[in-house]
Amino acid sequence: MRAHSAGEQIDRRTFLQATALPGLAACAWGCLSGSAIPLYALPTREDARFIVEAQFYDKQAYKKIKCKLCPRECVIDDRERGYCGVRENRGGTYYTLVHSRLAIAHIDPIEKKPFFHFCPGILAFSVATAGCNVNCKFCQNWEISQARPEQVRATYVSPRDLAAAAQQNHCPAIAHTYSEPVIFYEYLIDAAEAAHGVGIKSVVVTGGYIQKDPLKKMCRRVDAIKVDLKAFSQKYYKEIVNGDLKPVLDTLVTIRHEGTWLEIVYLVVPTLNDGDAEFQGLARWIKSELGTDVPVHFTRFYPQYLLKNLPPTPLETLERAKAIADNEGLHYVYIGNVPGHPGENTYCPQCRHLLIERLGFVVRKMDLHKGKCRYCQHPIAGVWQT
Ligand code: SF4
């Protein structure tokens, strides 16, 4: 598939034709490095179809509004935008500017999100708009996450067309990912509804920086959520993420209570969030607040964006984090971004047999039967197709 050049227009038929090319496979659209690459090179201009009233905000005096979508609770004057740059106050009514405004579309294995206990081996039609409500110094996708909608080439893809594109490309799931799905919340919710209408699942990859009411609604519309828990310290959240830890911990508890499938990724950044005490505290908190069945992925950091001065995470650090969490009693602790490491595999927590063997994003062996260990019948937490 070629990228459309700047100045070209793309319509619904073109989008569906483009995404229906035969032989389209995982990563065939250019995503080999782990970062998403914009699919359509189109200039974004004001288009009424992108602008939809926001779902969570309060009106205030003098045409001000208070956004109630994420914990920042931006108070915004008329004609101004919130911190995320994709929501605007127009005359006392608050709008999202990125409904159906896709900056990226890409086909990925679900393991790349990563989800290890959610329908292993399926492809996810992965999408994002511009914008984010935090500013992580290690962001892989900062070109779109830290951009305003007008700064990123995008195209109109309605929820119905998104579901159709996923179907045409044999993707059983749509993944809302890459930037921060919380800030394109209204699109995500509408897309999940359209997707369910045609039997397509929806998953969300998020930093979890969201208020409780919108989160609960999201939990009821989507099938799985992966939360990037960036650290287990408020200091890190303040200095490296420009956010707060407590709301993210609250998000994890809410997702668990709502019963939506949850996995956690912890990107281990050398010298910043890689201490034994932090790993220990994290593992104990997960065990007491979420239980032992939530998969936790300790993932290798590679230098990029504003943290190019740091080295990649040493393997022994990742192995130390996993050992601490294993010893604490968590059942499914993984090592990520180290293809071929045994820490990518799933073992039965009861009989210790190898059940799911992975190599990078490829599932090489599945020894589950109806969600249970084939050897000892122990139930394995997750959403399984076999
Ligand atoms: S979603 Fe955007 S506008 Fe709303 S509170 Fe968060 S950063 Fe502010």
Image (tube, rainbow, N blue to C red):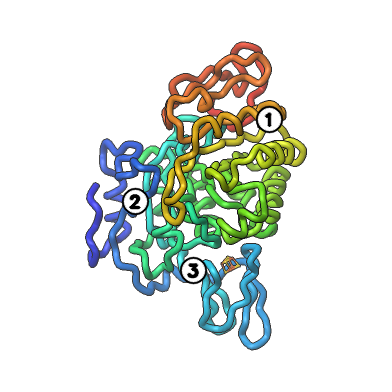
Beta carbon at label 3 within 8 Å of ligand 1? yes
Q: Closer to the camera, 298 or 367?
A: 298
Residue 86: which disc?
Answer: 3
In the orientation shown, which residue stands out farthest toward the bottom? 62
Q: Left or right: 153 with respect to 189?
A: left
Residue 75: name its quadrant. bottom right
Residue 322: which disc?
Answer: none
Q: Position of residue 268 (x, y in %)?
A: 55, 41
Where does ligand 1 appear, by image quarter? bottom right
Residue for point 73% across, 41% down:
285
Helix, strand or loop status at disc 3? loop
Q: Position of residue 90 (x, y in %)?
A: 53, 81
In the orientation shown, which residue stands out farthest toward the right? 288
- Which residue bears the numbered disc 1? 330
Q: How many marks?
A: 3
Q: Left or right: 150 with respect to 357?
A: left
Whether residue 223 is visible, yes or no, is: no
Of mark 2 and mark 3, the one earlier in the sequence is: 2
The answer to whether 201 is drawn above or below residue 66 in the figure is above
Q: Amino acid at mark 2?
A: Ile
Of mark 1 and mark 3, the one earlier in the sequence is: 3
Of mark 2 and mark 1, the one earlier in the sequence is: 2
Q: Please tell me how crowded label 3 is: few (under 14), some (14-19), or many (20+) other residues with Cα within 10 Å.
A: many
Residue for point 39% across, 47% down:
35
- Which residue bears the numbered disc 2? 37
Q: Closer to the camera, 63 or 210?
A: 210
Q: Quadrant of the C terminus?
A: top right
The answer to whether 136 is drawn above or below residue 173 in the figure is below
Q: Amino acid at mark 1?
A: Leu
Whether residue 64 is visible, yes or no, is: yes
Residue for point 59% across, 59% down:
239
